[in-house]
Structure formats: C-alpha cells, structure tokens
C-alpha cells in the first residue's frame, strides 16, 4: 500500500473546492544557446499536494526547477510561484520556497550544527529547532565538519537545512540520492508529514517506487517536453492481467487485438485485450483494465484462461511507455500502454 494511503484519506474530488495553484507555468521554454532544454511546458501544482517530476537524465527537470526559483532567465512563456514571477520577484519567491538542489554544496569548513545555525539565520522563515529535529531523526552527527562527512551524511545535512524553514513550498531535486534504504524511508515520511501540515512538495526522483508511495500527481518530462501528466489515484486503479489461452489447434504467428470482442458494458474498463502468437503453452493473453476490477471478473472467468496473474499497472510501465516515446498523444493522462509481455506474469 502506498505510504500516502496509509496516512491520508483521499476525499472525492467532487466534494472539495479546487485548490489554488502554488506553481503555474504556461508555455515555459528555456534555451541554452540554440538548444531547447525545456519546450513549452504548461503545468500547475496545487496547494497541499505532493507533485512528482519524472524523466530520464537530461529531460529538463532541473532546468524547470531552476526557472521556478528565478535562477535561470526564461526564454519564452511564463511561470508563477505563490503568485510571483520568479525573475521579477525572486526575493518574494525564495522567502516562500525551501529548495534542495541536486548538487547541494555546503561550507566545508563548518561543523554540521554550525551549518544549520547559519542557514536558519539566513532564511526569513528559518527554524533551528526544527532543523535540529530533522538531523536527529536522520541520525546525523552534527559535531563533524562538512569536509569530513560522507556523501550520504552531507545529503542528510542538506535535508535538515531544507526541512527547517516552514515555507509553503518545498522543492526537492532528488532528495534521496546517496541515502541508504532506511534513511530514504525516513525522508519519504518527512515529505508526507509536510503535506499533512498543509505544505506543498514538488520533487524529482529517478526512484519510481518513491514517487508511487508519496505523490498525488506526476509529470513526465522527456527531451524537454512535458510528455504525460498522471493522477496517481487513477494509476492505482489500473491492472494488467496476463495468462495463457490454451491452444485451439489453429497456430498463428500474429498478435490479435481483440478489443472489439469485449462486451459493450465493459468497453470503458478494458483498455487492451491482446492475444499473442502460438507458443508452447498456447497463446499469451494481455488485458489492461481501468477502474474497479469486480465488474470485469465474470467476463474474464468466461475466457477459460490458464495461469492467470493480475498485477497493478505500476508507474514503471507508464514510465517505459513515455520513455519509448509513446506518451505524446495525450499528455493529460489516460492510457498506460505497454508492450505485449513475452511471457505471462512479466509486465512491461
Ligand atoms: N548551463 C547549461 N548549458 C547548456 N546546456 C545545459 C545547461 N544546463 C543543462 N543543460 C542541458 O539541458 C538539458 C536538461 O538538463 P537538466 O539538468 O534540466 O536535466 P535533468 O532532467 O535534471 O537531468 P538529470 O536527471 O540528469 O539531473 C540537458 O541536455 C543538459 O545537458
């Protein structure tokens, strides 16, 4: 179960007023020379949500984050953070944002505690006792000089710096990089606690399970383009069934798309129904479902499948489809296409 579901009841969106956007970009574009690192990116992050940024190396995640903080000059388009233009009102934006860069650099000559004191005084919303609390929770030895800390210890210190100020927005660029699994879990709990306290968190990560466990919504970037937006609640309602269809004695080398054979009342719930070529055990079957599984089970039982396996269609399959360039058609999520699994039980 996702960590987020353990700690929060998700209300029906129809019951709630639409939350205001704390981050909004419109056609945001950044060129380095003649290279377009971010292309016409339009997205919004609502107050109080955890928003994930995903994408392969060089996709433009850090560029987007640095534009939001006013560290980079916008080439075209616009962005607003807490209602402010980051380039024109960079001081106002930075007072409202705590930012963990992917390559956080801390003063090497200082001891851990000194670093926390320094940054608590620097930030208008600095809070030393909170920073010390986070450092203790991450079991960081604050008596050590930064120069003599390991990479993971420096990352913990940077996290304590960032979780100190009570800003409305936290932007974390790969917050769990270089951390061991136990500490990663603690950091995810800290992120979830921020949302519980009403703050908004935007973070990038290459670890899909972390995004699945924490985020409310996700944006996928690929080659500078916003390739897909995804509501995690929708993802958790999607499943993939794989199975064998016993050989009917009619060998085939083709994969058949049998969506037309899905009963009409289930057509909105079955997104894919494919039967692969004949193999030693028969033909392999792949069915992707959306929404509650219960209404589809009777029909699935009627197909006389063998070795049936049903698994949640995780973020990994969506990530792969976007990565392979199949996410362009409908950036506002809907489908999670994947390739036909080679064998039942192996999802793409
Ligand atoms: N200062 C710069 N000058 C020229 N090109 C740059 C500069 N900064 C980034 N780029 C390029 O812009 C693209 C996007 O880089 P960015 O750092 O935003 O990617 P990213 O998604 O954060 O990648 P990663 O996951 O590896 O951190 C890359 O091709 C990168 O080489």
Image (spheres, rainbow, N blue to C red):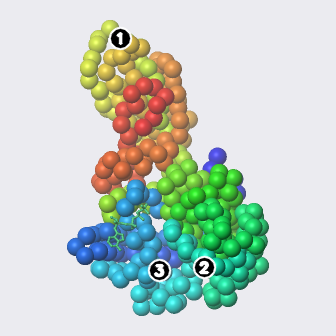
Of the image marks 3 and 1, the number of the one nearer the N terminus:
3
Of the image marks 3 and 2, the number of the one nearer the N terminus:
3
Q: Is residue 106 above or below residue 306?
A: below
Mark 1 is surrounded, within 10 Å at the Cα level, by few (under 14), some (14 to 19) or many (20 or more) other residues, namely few
- Residue at position x 39%, y 80% from top? 72
* Kind of element beneath mark 1: loop
Tell me the residue that label 2 is attached to: 107
* Kind of element beneath mark 2: loop
* Apparent side of residue 346 relative to residue 321 in the rendered image (left or right): right
Residue farthest toward the top in the current orientation of the protein? 249
Point out the frontmost of discs 3 and 2: 2
Mark 3 is surrounded, within 10 Å at the Cα level, by few (under 14), some (14 to 19) or many (20 or more) other residues, namely many
- Quick check: which quadrant has ligand 1? bottom left
**Residue 334 seen:** yes
Q: Is residue 295 above or below residue 132?
A: above
Tell me the residue that label 3 is attached to: 69
Q: Quadrant of the C terminus?
A: top left
Quarter location, residue 148: bottom right
Point out the frontmost of discs 3 and 1: 3
Quarter location, residue 62: bottom left
Tell me the residue that label 1 is attached to: 248
């Amino acid at each position: 179960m996702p960590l987020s579901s353990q700690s929060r009841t998700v209300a029906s969106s129809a019951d709630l007023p639409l939350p205001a956007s704390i981050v909004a970009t419109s056609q945001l574009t950044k060129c380095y020379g003649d290279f377009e690192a971010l292309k016409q990116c339009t997205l919004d992050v609502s107050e109080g949500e955890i928003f994930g940024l995903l994408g392969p190396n060089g996709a433009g995640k850090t560029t987007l984050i640095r534009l939001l903080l006013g560290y980079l000059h916008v080439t075209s388009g616009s962005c607003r953070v807490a209602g402010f233009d980051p380039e024109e009102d960079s001081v106002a934006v930075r007072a409202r944002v705590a930012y963990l860069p992917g390559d956080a650099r801390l003063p090497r000559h200082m001891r851990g505690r000194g670093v926390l004191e320094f940054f608590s005084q620097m930030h208008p919303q600095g809070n030393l006792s909170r920073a010390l609390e986070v450092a203790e929770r991450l079991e960081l030895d604050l008596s050590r000089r930064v120069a003599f800390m390991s990479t993971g210890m420096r990352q913990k210190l940077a996290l304590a710096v960032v979780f100190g100020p009570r800003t409305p927005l936290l932007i974390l660029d790969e917050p769990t990089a270089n951390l061991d699994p136990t500490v990663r879990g603690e950091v995810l709990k800290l992120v979830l606690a921020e949302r519980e306290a009403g703050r908004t968190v935007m973070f990038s990560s290459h670890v899909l399970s972390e995004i699945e466990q924490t985020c409310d919504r996700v944006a996928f970037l690929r080659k500078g383009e916003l390739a897909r937006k995804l509501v995690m609640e929708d993802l958790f309602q999607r499943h993939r069934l794989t199975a064998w269809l016993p050989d009917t004695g009619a060998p085939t080398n083709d994969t058949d798309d049998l969506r037309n054979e899905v009963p009409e009342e289930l057509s909105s719930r079955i997104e894919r129904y494919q039967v692969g070529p004949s193999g030693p055990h028969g033909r392999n079957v792949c069915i992707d479902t959306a929404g509650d599984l219960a209404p589809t089970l009777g029909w699935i039982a009627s197909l006389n499948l063998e070795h049936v396996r049903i698994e949640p269609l995780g973020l990994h399959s969506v990530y792969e489809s976007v990565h392979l360039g199949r996410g362009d058609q409908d950036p506002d999520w809907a489908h999670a296409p994947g390739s036909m699994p080679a064998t039942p039980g192996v999802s793409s």
